[in-house]
Image (cartoon, rainbow, N blue to C red):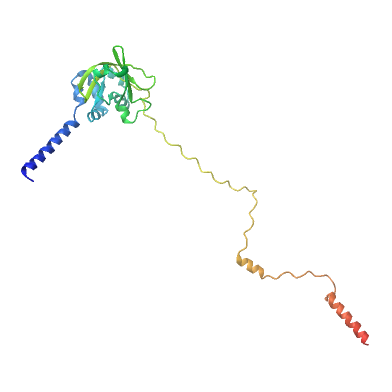
Amino acid sequence: MSLRALASCILFVALVSLFSSNFSNAFNITKILSNTSDFGSFNNLLTQTGLAETINSRSSLTILALDNGAVGSLQGKSKDEVQRILMNHVILDYIDQNKLKNLPNKTTTMTTLLQASGVAQQGQGFLNVTVSGNDILFGSEVKDSPLAARFVKSVYAEPYNISVLQISQSIVAPGISAPAPYTTLPPPPPSKKSPAPSPMTRKAPPPAPTKGEEDSGNTAAAPGPADSGAPCALGSGAAFAVLMGLVLNFVGL
């Protein structure tokens, strides 16, 4: 490879690396919020919950920021609960003040980071944004949730990348204070065992004799005829023959 070709390859790799680095770190939410002291507490919460890093790794986001006074409503809540609430303040789309004022039909539904996290249930990860007179109101998409958070002003905008909008109060979706309960399948029912035999159960017949037993049984002597009970040992036929012999002998005399 020639020196010119080698130099071209090195320059190309360097440019690609530089572009990728700049693209992956297109903005820094911590730095953006640190430019205004009003959002110091909100900025700290994003860092403590790990959401600042998640926000910086994405693109085309809108952050619904709370000033130091509005953050007070989150005091006393657990870290996990604060994280879930603040995830509902990160809209997965670029929305600036101009877009808010020109919402189609004066209302829309927006998807938040909470929905993308997979822990939201029953609409908790969606926001209802509605234009009402001179106000732009935000609220949870969960049924019967109030539109209580009001748009205050635009804090920062980098078109098509990130927009930071200040709202008057936090958006707490109903049921978000506790994660979805973990459910397990019930254990299978015990298998049915055959009932033990009753003491009154009739005994089974004895087993059939084996072949050897059958053969030995055949060689046994059969029982003889019952005695007639006559005093003479000769049968009636023998007695008749003796009588005839005496008659013939008498005639011959």
> Is residue 105 placed above or below 13 in the rendered structure?
above
Task: Using residue 197 as the reference point, say whether residue 51 is left or right of it.
Answer: left
Residue under the point 29% across and 13% down = 135
Q: Is residue 129 visible?
A: no
Give the x, y percent position of residue 173. 35, 22
Residue under the point 20% across and 19% down = 37
Q: Within the image, what quadrant is residue 39 found in?
A: top left
Q: Is residue 73 visible?
A: yes
Task: Using residue 124 as the reference point, say whether residue 55 is left or right of it.
Answer: left
> Is residue 176 placed above or below 245 in the rendered structure?
above
Query: Residue placed farthest to the left in the image?
Result: 3
Task: Decide which of 162, 179 is in the foreground and name it.
Answer: 162
> Is residue 191 placed above or below 109 in the rendered structure?
below
Give the x, y percent position of residue 217. 66, 67
Give the x, y percent position of residue 126. 33, 24
Quadrant in the picture for the C terminus: bottom right
Task: Decide which of 108, 149 is in the foreground and name it.
Answer: 108
